């Protein structure tokens, strides 16, 4: 963001660098402490112990399945909703949009009771869908808010030209909107991946079968009434966060571009 500005004086550059350093420290220090704590005692042997937990590979596969399903649902719902709210003439669409935005004020923990009742009623308790659907639903309002702003920046003339050429609504969505929304799509994918992969409360409540456990529950194997091995807990937490860190670093450029485009109109 600061690339947009030119800081000519030494004092201004020092001030900006100091402010950026102070902003980064609250995030870097806990991460450094977690890495340092995970290496105490047995060193990298702590990670070997964590990886030797029975079913650890299954935990990663379960988390990947939940994340991929949530990403697919959120991506389709977000793009279609943003297209409708931004470019289509729909009666009362602003009312529906702001009703969706109200969902941003609802914390996950408040929804546990109604979600539990619905999961039990529809036979989804102790299934992946009891976690996937709420995760996706909780992400959609924010991703639609960002993506609608991005789609607003796409010229209407492109859609009008496609309509003149005989394209219907579905074809305009697929051939015009989707190709032009790739930076925003990457931002949506990364956001949903991070939130779905790091989800802890929903899997803890809705997944009781050991075969359905996810990677965020891995540190629990080293905590209990008579056991609290903090080095293994930290190693497990770091291993569980590693895929999202790699994904963000790999897609950082596209993620920041999409977030900037979606946040600024």
Image: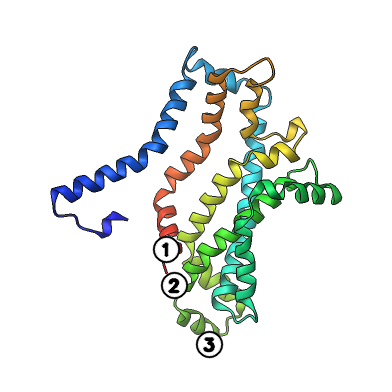
Q: Is residue 135 above or below residue 203?
A: below
Considering depth in this image, is 35 or 230 the residue closer to the camera? 230
The residues bearing labels 1 and 3 have C-alpha atoms spaced at a distance of 28 Å
N-terminal-most mark, 2 or 1: 2
User: SS class of the residue under badge 1?
Assistant: helix
- Name the outermost residue toward the top: 41
**How far apart are the alpha carbons under marks 3 and 2?**
21 Å
Q: Is residue 103 above or below residue 135?
A: below
Mark linked to residue 209 = none
Mark 1 or mark 3: which comes first in sequence? 3
Per the image, label 3 sits on a secondary structure element best described as helix
Residue 107 on image: x %, y %: 63, 50
In the rendered structure, find residue 164 and report the number of the disc placed on it. Answer: 3
Q: Residue furthest bottom?
A: 164
Q: Left or right: 232 with respect to 256?
A: right
* Residue indicated by mark 2: 153
The C terminus is located in which quarter? bottom left
Residue 263 picture location, percent across and down: 44, 62
Q: Quadrant of residue 197?
A: top right
Q: Is residue 216 left or right of residue 186?
A: right
Spatial CA distance of label 2 from label 1 is 9 Å
Image coordinates of residue 104 in percent, x first then y, are 60, 58
Which residue is pictured at 43% across the width and 44% down the height? Answer: 250
Whether tag 2 and tag 1 are in contact, CB under 8 A, the answer is: yes
Q: Quadrant of the N terminus?
A: bottom left
Say what secondary structure mark 2 lies in. loop
Residue behind mark 1: 261
């Amino acid at each position: 963001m600061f690339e947009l500005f030119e800081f000519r004086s030494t004092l201004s550059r020092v001030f900006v660098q100091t402010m950026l350093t102070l902003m980064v420290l609250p995030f870097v220090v806990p991460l450094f402490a977690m890495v340092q704590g995970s290496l105490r005692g047995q060193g990298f042997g702590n990670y070997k112990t964590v990886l030797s937990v029975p079913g650890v590979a299954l935990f990663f596969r379960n988390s990947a399945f939940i994340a991929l399903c949530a990403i697919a649902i959120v991506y389709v719902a977000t793009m279609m909703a943003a297209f409708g709210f931004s470019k289509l003439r729909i009666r009362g669409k602003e009312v529906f949009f702001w009703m969706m935005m109200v969902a941003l004020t609802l914390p996950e923990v408040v929804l546990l009771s109604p979600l539990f009742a619905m999961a039990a009623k529809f036979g989804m308790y102790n299934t992946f869908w009891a976690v996937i659907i709420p995760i996706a639903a909780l992400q959609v309002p924010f991703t639609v808010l960002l993506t609608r702003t991005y789609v607003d920046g796409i010229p209407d003339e492109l859609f009008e030209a496609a309509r003149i050429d005989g394209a219907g609504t579905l074809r305009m969505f697929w051939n015009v909107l989707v190709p032009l929304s790739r930076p925003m799509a990457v931002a949506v994918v990364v956001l949903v991946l991070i939130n779905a992969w790091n989800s802890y409360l929903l899997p803890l409540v809705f997944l009781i079968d050991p075969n359905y456990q996810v990677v965020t529950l891995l540190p629990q194997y080293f905590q209990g009434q008579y056991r609290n091995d903090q080095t293994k807990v930290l190693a497990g937490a770091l291993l569980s966060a590693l895929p999202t860190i790699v994904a963000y670093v790999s897609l950082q450029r596209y993620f920041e571009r999409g977030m900037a485009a979606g946040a600024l109109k």
